[in-house]
Image (cartoon, rainbow, N blue to C red):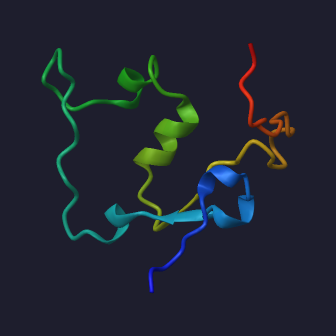
């Protein structure tokens, strides 16, 4: 019998993880850093700021074992502005 998993598109926030496991925290040797395509030198956080937010860069660069998940659209940090999607598209 197939296993049924909840869909994440249903806006049920209890189905989303509250924290993530960071594999880099338990590696004996860290992987080499990604290289900047223009300079071929290791990327520093300032190189990523034009594309990503500072919070995202800190989230991806941490070596903590468990990393808190990002707040959803209806979290305490962000007021819920999302509305239910209707089954008919808007004109």
Report the side of 20 relative to 61 (left or right).
Answer: right
Report the side of 69 relative to 52 (left or right).
Answer: right
- Toward which corner of the image does residue 23 lie, by quadrant? bottom left
At 83% across and 36% down in the image, what residue appears? 83
Considering every residue shown, the one lying at the far bottom of the view is 1
Quadrant housing the N terminus: bottom left
Residue 82 versus residue 4 in the image, above or below:
above
At 73% across and 59% down in the image, what residue appears? 12
- Toward which corner of the image does residue 35 lie, by quadrant? top left
Q: Could you tell me residue 40's position as x and y percent?
A: 12, 23
The one of 23 and 29 positioned closer to us in this rendering: 23
Count of labels in the image? 0
Q: Could you tell me residue 7's position as x and y percent?
A: 60, 59
Q: Could you tell me residue 48's position as x and y percent?
A: 39, 25
The one of 90 and 58 positioned closer to us in this rendering: 90
Residue 67 versus residue 83 in the image, above or below:
below
Considering every residue shown, the one lying at the far front of the view is 88
- Asked whether the viewer can see residue 46, the reply is yes
The one of 35 and 15 positioned closer to us in this rendering: 15
The one of 72 and 3 positioned closer to us in this rendering: 3
At 50% across and 42% down in the image, what residue appears? 58
- Asked whether the viewer can see residue 69, the reply is no
């Amino acid at each position: 019998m197939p296993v049924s998993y909840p869909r994440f598109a249903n806006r049920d926030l209890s189905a989303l993880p509250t924290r993530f496991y960071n594999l880099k925290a338990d590696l004996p040797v860290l992987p080499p850093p990604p290289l900047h395509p223009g300079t071929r030198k290791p990327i520093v956080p300032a190189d990523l700021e034009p594309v990503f937010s500072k919070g995202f860069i800190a989230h991806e660069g941490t070596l903590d074992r468990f990393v808190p998940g990002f707040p959803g659209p209806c979290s305490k940090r962000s007021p819920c502005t999302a509305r239910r999607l209707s089954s008919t598209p808007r004109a």
